């Protein structure tokens, strides 16, 4: 079974440009999460999509946005790039939350990430 | 202030040594997860602990959830170079909230 895939592997942009990152979840998974892993800031939650809708977003400016397509793949868009946006962007997928509640013991499966460098 | 503080931040040891990594918080959690991230890859779930005082073993790795469910530890026995990576604790509150991480390097 194929895992979570992300493209591109590396992306180099300059300040002010826009970046688009893509993620394909594991077959059968309807939830997609985006995380940012920046040097010195650790791994931080960015966005959560489930069944095509944005369910939650982390403490990031509106420049960070995304969407989930009918086939459950997802896109992360970062507008007006700033130097501090340089980071590894990780996508993760899981099965639909449904009626699940705490304790949350299910597994999120991560892709290998897209390394975004802003010059 | 970080919700989950991990210590040590860095650990560099020789093959065969034992080590313990800690994950601490002032909050009580219903569950806690441990992940390992290797260079060029995303984090991979190692274990989920749910019950206070719970101990889980995964080969040479032993995970413990504190009695008060505020802290956890990961102990590795006879570390091997393949154990090298970034170890992250996390709480799963729909979204994952990760700890500050412990970067482990095991030299042959």
Image (spheres, helix red, strand yellow):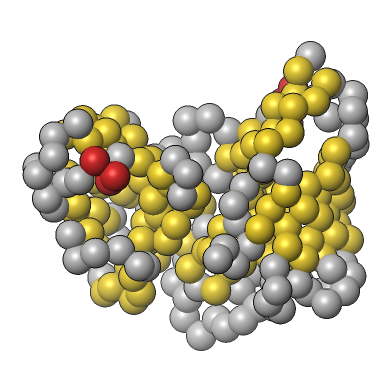
**Residue A20 visible to an observer of this rendering:** no
Q: Position of residue A15 (x, y in %)?
A: 13, 39
Residue most extreme to the top: B108
Q: Report the residue at 59% width, 52% height from top.
A: B100
From the viewer's perspective, tell me whether residue B38 is left or right of residue A98. Answer: right
Q: Position of residue A19 (x, y in %)?
A: 17, 44
From the viewer's perspective, tell me whether residue B43 is left or right of residue A45. Answer: right
Picture quadrant of residue A32:
bottom left
Q: Position of residue A94 (x, y in %)?
A: 47, 62
The quadrant in which the N terminus of chain B is found is bottom right
Q: Decide: is B7 above or below A51.
A: above
Q: Nearer the viewer, residue A64 or A110?
A: A64
Q: Position of residue B98 (x, y in %)?
A: 56, 58
Q: Report the residue at 59% width, 67% height from top.
A: B3
From the viewer's perspective, tell me whether residue A100 is left or right of residue A59. Answer: right
Q: Nearer the viewer, residue B60 or A39?
A: A39
């Amino acid at each position: 079974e194929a895992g979570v895939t992300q493209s591109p592997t590396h992306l180099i942009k300059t300040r002010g440009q826009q970046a688009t990152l893509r993620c394909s979840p594991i077959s059968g998974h309807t939830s997609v999460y985006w995380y940012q892993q920046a040097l010195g800031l650790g791994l931080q939650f960015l966005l959560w999509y489930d069944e095509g809708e944005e369910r939650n977003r982390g403490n990031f400016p509106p420049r960070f946005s995304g969407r989930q397509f009918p086939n459950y793949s997802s896109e992360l868009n970062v507008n007006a790039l700033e130097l501090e946006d340089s980071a590894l962007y990780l996508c993760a997928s899981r099965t639909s939350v449904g009626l699940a509640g705490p304790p949350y013991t299910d597994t999120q499966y991560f892709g290998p990430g897209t390394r975004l460098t802003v010059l | 202030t970080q919700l989950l503080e991990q210590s040590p931040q860095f650990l560099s040891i020789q093959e065969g040594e034992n080590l313990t990594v800690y994950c601490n918080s002032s909050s009580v959690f219903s569950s806690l997860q441990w992940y390992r991230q290797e260079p060029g890859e995303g984090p991979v779930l190692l274990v989920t602990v749910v019950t206070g005082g719970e101990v889980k073993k995964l080969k040479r790795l032993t995970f413990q959830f504190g009695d008060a469910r505020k802290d956890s530890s990961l102990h590795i026995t006879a570390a091997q170079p393949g154990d090298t990576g970034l170890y992250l604790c996390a709480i799963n509150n729909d979204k994952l909230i990760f700890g500050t991480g412990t970067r482990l390097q095991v030299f042959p």
